[in-house]
Image: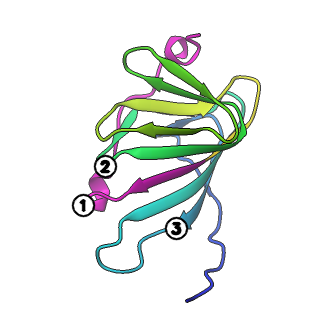
Amino acid sequence: MELEPKRPTSKGPQATFTGDVWVDAIALPHEPGQRMVVSRVRFSPGAHTAWHSHALGQTLHITEGVALIGTRDGRVIEARPGDTVYTPPGEEHWHGATPDDFMEHLAMLDNGDDPATTTTWLEHLSDAEYRRP
């Protein structure tokens, strides 16, 4: 067993996020065969991801604020603290804060066989896609 010191908070890059987003890595693989990655992600009001998908899916657990999670078919889920949202492998989606509130979630996923292909980042969503009711 070992205590791991907190890693520095990183700023979400503009290439994959709109607005101010901060990421704290919580868990990363340590041993061969391990794939689990967990991060705490904090979004300022109006901040959100670009469209993306995950090779092995993703689970989001909302811890603060109200999350918006959108899919290509136009559906937008509103999730609150304590809610958990699962996105299956390959489903293109986005997630972020509402325009008026901060939001924080735990993002949990497994690395793919090649960790570089775990998340496929796509285009930024339009204002109309983000503001869809």
Q: Are marks 3 and 1 in contact (CB under 8 Å)?
A: no
Going by the numbered disc 3, the residue's amino acid type is Ala
Residue 13 got which mark?
none
Q: Secondary structure at mark 3?
A: strand
Q: Position of residue 51 (x, y in %)?
A: 41, 31
Q: Are marks 1 and 2 in contact (CB under 8 Å)?
A: no
Q: Give the class, few, some or many, for how many residues have Cα within 10 Å of label 3's Cα (few <14, many ≥20).
A: some
In terms of image quadrants, where is residue 133? top right
Where is the N terminus found, in terms of image quarters? bottom right
Residue 27 got which mark?
3
- Position of residue 121 relative to residue 66, above or below, is below
Going by the numbered disc 1, the residue's amino acid type is Asp
Q: Position of residue 72 (x, y in %)?
A: 37, 20
In front: label 1 or label 2: 2
User: How far is mark 3 from mark 1, CA to CA?
Assistant: 18 Å
In front: label 3 or label 1: 3
User: Mark 1 sits on what residue?
Assistant: 114
- Position of residue 25 relative to residue 57, above or below, is below
Q: Where are the magenta residues, as a range?
A: 106-133
Is residue 84 within the magenta segment? no
Q: Position of residue 35 (x, y in %)?
A: 36, 65
User: How far is mark 3 from mark 2, CA to CA?
Assistant: 17 Å
Q: Secondary structure at mark 2?
A: loop
Q: Outermost residue, bottom direction?
A: 1
- Position of residue 36 relative to residue 95, above or below, is below
User: Mark 2 sits on what residue?
Assistant: 56
**Nearest to N terminus: mark 3 or mark 1:** 3
Going by the numbered disc 2, the residue's amino acid type is Leu
Q: Position of residue 76 (x, y in %)?
A: 52, 20
**Nearest to N terminus: mark 3 or mark 2:** 3
